[in-house]
Amino acid sequence: MKIDYYYSHVSPWTFLGHQRLRDIAAKHDAEIDFVPLTLAKIFPVSGGLPLGKRAPQRQEYRMWELKRWPAYLGIEINIEPAHFPVDDGPSAKIAGLAKQHGGDIADLSGAFLRAVWQEERDITDPDTLIAIANENGFDGKALYEESITEAGERVLEENSQRGIDAGVYGSPFYIVGGEPFWGQDRLDLLERLLTTQ
């Protein structure tokens, strides 16, 4: 069984679901295909809007959910982090390249998510990107230097286009056997599907 996992490193919902998805996959012996992308390429073709351009009532409701879900899940989160919103492209390039080179990026992506939502780190800062990659067993300097070349832009474009082609319109987005699930609040339904496969 395989779970195609499309996500942005700056999404709080991705953060809230990241480890839970990994635990569910391990429980059901399912493989996760990690696809880090940028919402800047997804939203224009899917009708989505960046947070600052959403209607006030939608922004207000988001804050209610950001209080409810972490409390329900028992996950610590800073709902108004110092470095948000920020560009999700730089970290997606590094993770995408690390995967392209054969690396397991589960922990790396988890670290990028924690950096934003728990640790008050700026994942657009080159030194921070390099440090996080190093902390997770990669050559951060080499990955960063590659990420600012055409290779980095190419992997970001490919991952984002793969998401668009798959019907992704937000983060996190999971696909199992052709069936889509949008949002960490659908993980129970995703797990239910895995139990029937």
Image (cartoon, grey):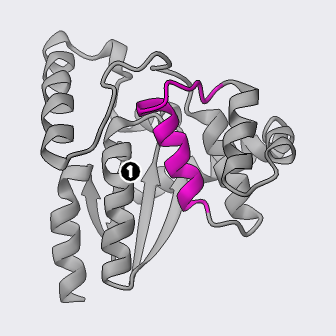
Asked which quadrant contains residue 176, the reply is: bottom left
Judge whether residue 130 is colored magenta. Answer: no
Q: Is residue 82 visible?
A: yes
At 75% across and 28% down in the image, what residue appears? 126
The one nearer the camera, 170 or 141, is 141
Disc 1 residue type (three-letter): Val
Q: Is residue 158 above or below residue 23?
A: above
Q: Find disc 1 in the rendering and name its residue.
A: 168
In this rendering, the count of numbered labels is 1
Q: Quadrant of the C terminus?
A: bottom left
Q: Picture coordinates of residue 86 (x, y %)?
A: 53, 22
Judge whether residue 109 is colored magenta. Answer: yes
The one nearer the camera, 128 or 53, is 128
Q: Is residue 83 above or below residue 162?
A: above
- The main secondary structure of the magenta stretch is helix
Report the span colored magenta.
105-124
Q: Picture coordinates of residue 139 (x, y %)?
A: 82, 51
Left or right relative to 67: residue 49: right
Left or right relative to 165: residue 180: left
At 41% across and 20% down in the image, what residue appears? 81
Secondary structure under tag 1 reads: loop
At 21% across and 18% down in the image, what residue appears? 59
